[in-house]
Image (tube, rainbow, N blue to C red):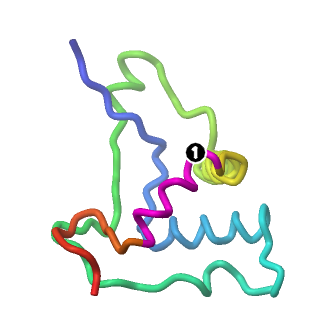
Amino acid sequence: MKTYAIGSNAERRNVDVVGAICDTMDTLVPGGNGVSYRELISFVPDRPGHDFRYAIDFTKLKTELGWSPQHSFEQGLRLTVQWYVESTAWWKPLLSKHEAGIRRGLSKKRA
């Protein structure tokens, strides 16, 4: 059995991915008040082990199996955001955990 990393050669800083998600939301679901989703970003203290970026080398997958991404980062991001916009029945139940102040990577609720 072999393990392959799947990536797209599209390394980005986490904060840049968040900005791109906001820009995509501005296009797909514009706010009624003309405010960009970027203005809703609030920075929180880093969690233990926080990574500022994620980089995946998929050379083994490309070399051994001939795989390459079908979409650019921007296309894939737009398709992903569109899925979430259209799939509220899947993610809305998760809001109750968020509203309770539960944050992954921390052992207790936010103050």
Q: Name the residue under label 1.
A: 90
- Residue at 61 percent across and 87 percent down: it is 39
Q: Which residue is drawn at 58% across and 50% down?
A: 73
Q: Position of residue 4 (x, y in %)?
A: 31, 27
Which of these two is toward me, 70 or 47?
A: 47
From the viewer's perspective, is 60 left or right of 69? left
What is the quadrant of residue 101 in the picture?
A: bottom left
Q: What residue type is labelled 1?
A: Trp
Residue 67, compared with residue 27, is above or below; it is above
Nearer-the-camera pick, 76 or 43: 43
The picture places residue 54, in percent across and down from the top left corner, at 34, 56
Q: Residue at x 70, y 54 (%)?
A: 85
Q: Which of 44 and 65 is in front in this view?
A: 44
Q: How crowded is mark 1: few (under 14 residues within 10 Å), some or many (20 or more)?
A: few
93 relative to 35, above or below = above
How far across and down, in percent of the image, does residue 107 sit?
16, 68
- Horizontal and vertical percent position of residue 2: 23, 17
44 on left or right of 90: left
Q: Tell me the SS state at disc 1.
A: helix
Q: In which quarter of the image is the C terminus?
A: bottom left
**For residue 31: magenta?**
no
Q: Bounds of the magenta span? A: 89-99
The image quadrant that residue 57 belongs to is: top left
- Majority secondary structure in the magenta region: helix
